[in-house]
Amino acid sequence: MDKSLRDLLKSVKYSSFILAVLWSVHIYKELSGRSLAQFGVFPRETDGLVGILCAPLIHGSWEHLFSNSAPLFFAMTIIHFFYKRVALSSFFLVYFLTGAAVWMFGRSVYHIGASGLVYGLLAFIFWSGVFRRNIKSIVLALVITMVFFGYLEGIVPFQEGISWESHLLGLIVGIIIAFFLKGIIEKDEMHYDPWEHERDESVEYFLPRDTFEKTLKQREREDDNPWD
């Protein structure tokens, strides 16, 4: 099997596992008839700290779960496939820092759902394109812009029944994580020097190997100072 296909299948399995956890929690909630809202993030209350871990796993309705499942699956698969070296760190940083930010700055209500995580991961993909500035990351940023542009509406403040704080803070966290992880370069982002394996000092060349690497002024200075 082709390596790219194996990597894609691995990414899909990873994303599917996370979604399976979310769906299992919601199915349990529906079958048991219990409300799990008390496990959400409740800002600035000690009891609400548990929500940093649990809130993204809990959804208020099937519609709520459906609306988060597709973009979450899409974002996790892209990150795991194209940004292997930072896939896990970006996921967990966005997951926990978004919850912590909501706990510190959100309204005093229970915040549940994976939408903050979704916004954080989508922001990470888009801003990785801005900070890394290579072809792959820029194309991914454009894809995110075209497919999820309408999600910007979700950060408008004071929307009834929507944790817009999770959306906005998740987006901000995603930008910050993209900035701090931009230096961890993937293999396909590394610059390749075609002369790297051909620099053999024992071989005489017609022109110096750095002929095209120095400017005219640099060469003039070398000619004026032959003993340097």
Image (cartoon, helix red, strand yellow):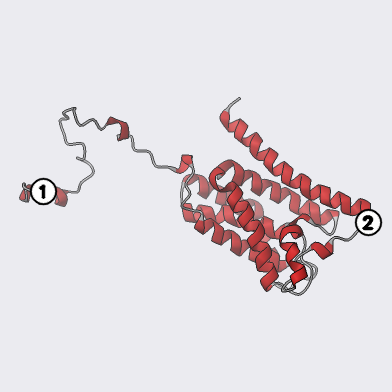
User: Identity of the amino acid at label 1?
Assistant: Glu
Asked whether, in this view, residue 143 is left or right of residue 131, the answer is right
Q: Is 41 above or below relative to 143?
A: below
Q: Is 98 above or below relative to 88?
A: below
Percent coordinates x, y for residue 111 in the rendering = 76, 66
Asked whether, in this view, residue 189 is left or right of residue 102, the answer is left
The answer to whether residue 199 of the structure is visible from this angle is: yes
Q: Residue at x 51, y 58 (%)?
A: 179
Q: Residue furthest top?
A: 1
Residue 209, image quadrant: top left
Number of the front mark, 2 or 1 = 2
In the rendering, which numbered label is found on residue 222? 1
Q: Residue at x 46, y 43 (%)?
A: 189
Crowd around label 1: few <14 · some 14–19 · many ≥20 (10 Å): few
Percent coordinates x, y for residue 49 in the rendering = 73, 66
Upstream in the sequence, badge 2 or badge 1?
Answer: 2
Q: Is 157 above or below relative to 68?
A: below
Q: Residue at x 7, y 47 (%)?
A: 223
Residue hosting label 2: 33
User: Identity of the amino acid at label 2?
Assistant: Gly
Crowd around label 2: few <14 · some 14–19 · many ≥20 (10 Å): few
Q: Is 110 above or below relative to 60?
A: below
